[in-house]
Each structure stands twice: as structure tokens, then as C-alpha cells.
Amino acid sequence: MSEPRIVELLRDIKPRRIVIIKPSALGDVVQTLPLLPVLKRKYPEAHIDWVIRSELADLLENHPDLERLLIYHRKGNLSSATQLLRALWNGRYDLALDLQGLLRTGVMTAATRATLRVGMETSREYAHLACHGLLPGTSKQVPAHARYWQIARLLGEESEPQPVQLGVGEQDRKRVDEILAEIPGPFLAIHPGAMWVTKRWPISSFAEVGKRACQQYGLHLVVVGTQGEKGAAEQLCQQVRQACPERIVRNLAGETSLKQLAVVLDRARIVLSNDSGPMHMAAMMGTPVVGIFTCTSAQRSGPGGKQHQLVQAKVPCAASYRKQCPFSGSGHMQCLSAVSVFQVWSAFQRAIEASDKREQVA
């Protein structure tokens, strides 16, 4: 189907039931979230469901614009897969949006039997065969955040994405209040982890920026991450504690749910992070971000917005999206060492000073 035709159908359809198929990853799911209120405004009577990976379901539970979560178990058995496909088959969907574009989501999309099934130009593994058409302006060359927002544009939305609203309950807020109770003032949140080893800037470098932030701006420090990142996070905390004993330093790695993490990042003065899900979560909550990009592209994968400062490694293999370094010897992991503390600290200063100016204007 031609591009103008699929856009015309998308604009004309009056769906009663919509399903968003976007199981992962955290950063991509977060960047898709601003689309939800747009769909709800355009189709106020529609029920909207979301196919989400089990590990990320907590983030979307009780979202005000969602009717139901359909859980995808990445390491599930035949029974769990059959249950999901049966739910999609019986969903009576009018509109299915495959925003993942992989073989498994193509199967899910086909199972919906939706009147209109659309995907993105980034679709691969034959996922496009399950769709009636692919949406223009959603190719790999388009930044990820703009790619997802293109759907809103095609639906007639003229405004820019707004900070996301999550269904955070009172219990989660109270838990964060307890966690942050001992921190008497503004704090820097650092996420030093990442799924890929080629994304992980050295802990000692993060610690150096953390020390300078505590000393020059009087910030306290909160380090976030998964349970598996707790050890590295503690190394970072210890180094900052030794240099800044007068500041509160907390290691929250593994201690928060996804919703609680979102609240922590929302309350942070500024966030320093590798290219990761928490970085995108902070940006979508409206918190200024300093992002470090080594094997990925700041332009393609970074958050949008002038309040963020993104530092890109300057090496030939930068933005290669390799999960493992292909080089040995002196060239091994050169994308990490190519990002200096000076570059990140300079970006940090620009971000926090620009944020100060915006607060003064407000």
C-alpha cells in the first residue's frame, strides 16, 4: 500500500479498540509513551491495550490512558506465547500499531486481525508483511524519539511531546519519600550502567564528575540501576563519599521499582547517564540529562530537547551499535576512553546553568 494511502487510512479510521505492540526495550517504551495521550484525545471512546515485556510491565500498570496490558514473556514457554496470541486474536482490534518491527511482533500483529495494521519503516525480519502499510518518516535515519512522535504528527498533533504521566500510586510516592528523606537538598542522579558493555563509561570517570558536581554546585548524589549493577554503583558511591564527606551519597541500585525509579529521576536536579532506559526515562519526566554516547549515536538514539547535553565519542567506530568491541590491543574499547571527563564535565556545566536560567525565567 502506498504511503499516502496508509496515512489517509490512519487519519480516517474511527477505532473502538487499539493495541500498541511495543514489548521493549525500556528506553523505546518510554519514548513511545507521549503518544498515548494523543491517541486518547483523538479517540476518547477507544480502549487502548499495550503488549509489554513482563519485566517492564510495572512501568505501565495503572496508566490512566491504558485499558489492559498484554504480557509478553521473552523467555516464556509455549503456553505463555499461546495465551498472548489468543488474547490478541480475541481482542477485536480495529487498529494495531507494531512499533517494534521484528518477526515476533509481526506474528503478534497478524494475530490481531485488526482492520488496520500499521508498522514503521524500521521493520525487519519480514514484520512488514503483517501490516497493511508502513508509516512515512519512521526510517532508521530519523531520531528514535521523533520516529515515535511521527505517528502523533500523522494523526494531526501539532504540539511537541509533553513530560509523560505514569500511573504512580501513593504507595510508590511514599516509598520514594522514605528513600530520599535524608537528602536535604538538590541531588544529582547518576546511572552508570547499561545492557551493552560498549555503552559503559568507566566508573572512575563517573565518580570524577560526581565529585565535581558535589563540590562546585553543592549537590548530593543518588546512584540508580538494577540489582546486577549494585556493585559498580557502590564503587562509584565510595569514591564520591571519600572526596565529599559532607554530602549525602545514596546507592539505590536494585532498590526501586520502575515507577519508583521514575519518581526519583523526576525529583533529581539533573541526571548523568550512559545511553540507557533510565536516561530516556529522566528526559521524558522533564529532567535535564547529560548523556554519554559511545557505540550508539547521540543524534539517532538521544532524547530530544535543548535542555539535554549529549556527548558523542569521536572515534571511527563510534555509533556502530556493536554490543561487543570488534578490536583488540590499543583499539579495544576506544570509544569509552575517547569520551573524557573534561567533555562530560563541560556538558554538565552547560546543562545545569541552562536549567538555572530557565527556572529564573519561569
Image: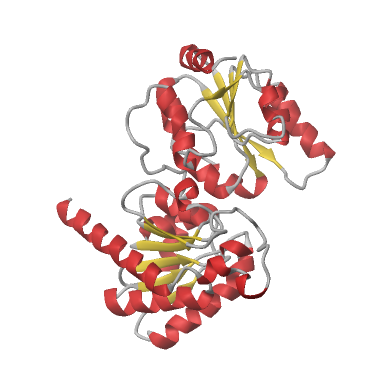
Instruction: Tell me the quarter of the image containing the N terminus.
Output: top right
Query: Left or right: where does residue 198 sit relative to residue 309?
Result: right
Task: Compare residues 40 and 321 and report the one nearer the observer.
Answer: 321
**Residue 285 in the image: above or below residue 175:** above
Q: Residue at x 45, y 20 (%)?
A: 43
Does residue 290 appear in the picture of this structure? yes
**Residue 311 at x, y percent in the picture:** 42, 60
Colour mapping used in the image: secondary structure
Q: Residue at x 48, y 36 (%)?
A: 147
**Residue 238 at x, y percent in the picture:** 49, 83
Query: Left or right: where does residue 137 sit relative to residue 245?
Result: right
Furthest residue in direction front, as rendered? 316
Query: Left or right: where does residue 320 sit relative to residue 143?
Result: right
**Residue 28 in the image: above or below residue 93:** below
Furthest residue in direction left, as rendered? 361
Query: Left or right: where does residue 293 sit relative to residue 288?
Result: right
**Residue 296 at x, y percent in the picture:** 54, 54
Does residue 171 appear in the picture of this structure? no
- Count of all numbered marks drawn on residues in the image: 0
Q: Residue at x 53, y 34 (%)?
A: 139
Furthest residue in direction right, as rendered? 78
Q: Residue 290, located in which quarter of the rendered image?
A: bottom left
Task: Compare residues 318 and 203 and report the one nearer the observer.
Answer: 318
Q: Residue 233, located in which quarter of the rendered image?
A: bottom right
Task: Compare residues 146 and 114 and report the one nearer the observer.
Answer: 146
**Residue 224 at x, y percent in the picture:** 50, 65
Q: Residue 185, located in which quarter of the rendered image?
A: bottom left
Task: Compare residues 121 and 335 and report the one nearer the observer.
Answer: 335
Q: Residue at x 36, y 80 (%)?
A: 247
